Image (cartoon, helix red, strand yellow):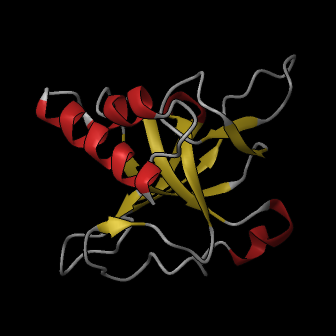
Amino acid sequence: MAHARARLALLGAALLAGLPLAEACEAIDPVAALPVMVGGQEDMDACMSLGYVDHLNPKGDNFLSVRAQPRAGAPETYRVKAGHMLWLCDESRDGKWYGVVFQPAERMEDWADCNVSTPLPRGPYRGPCRSGWVAKRFVELAAG
């Protein structure tokens, strides 16, 4: 418990120093996940857009890394293939990353069952699907 309080105090100090939330979290714990934020508008879906993985290098690994934070060096939490449906819920401060919500590959046909297609109060996504950060350049907008 004391460790958690110390980390919160460090986070507060970093935010007071003017660091953006993502950088403050990274400064305290470079492997801690930055939650994907959803909701916040009474008359809008919690995640207002839907996209799919595209533009992968055909000579590459043929997957897109889902990361714990919106940066290339952040820990990989999952891999999605071309065509995988993603709810686009959040965006990084620099505009290069989407905060996404998605079903794992074995449940991709249930992509609509992530509880983000109705209004929710603003807050971190808490399930039932997976969430994380993907490079925006590999996502094609499908709706929204």
Question: Residue at position x 52%, y 30% from top?
Answer: 30
Quadrant in the picture for residue 114: bottom right
Residue nearest the viewer, comparing 75 with 54: 75
Q: At which x and y percent is residue 9?
A: 26, 44
Q: Is residue 104 above or below residue 51?
A: below
Q: At which x and y percent is residue 119?
A: 30, 81
Question: Residue at position x 32%, y 67% from top?
Answer: 123
| Res. 28 in view | yes
Q: At which x and y percent is residue 121?
A: 25, 77
Residue nearest the viewer, comparing 48 with 97: 97
Q: Is residue 98 above or below residue 105?
A: above
Outermost top residue: 59
Question: Residue at position x 45%, y 75% from top?
Answer: 116
Quadrant in the picture for residue 54: top right
Q: In this view, does 10 lie above or below 46?
A: above
Q: Is residue 103 left or right of residue 2?
A: right
Question: Residue at position x 76%, y 73% from top?
Answer: 109
Q: In this view, does 6 lie to the left or right of 142?
A: left
Which corner quadrant holds the C terminus?
A: bottom left
Which corner quadrant holds the N terminus?
A: bottom left
Q: At which x and y percent is residue 15?
A: 19, 36
| Res. 96 in view | no
Residue nearest the viewer, comparing 47 with 124: 124
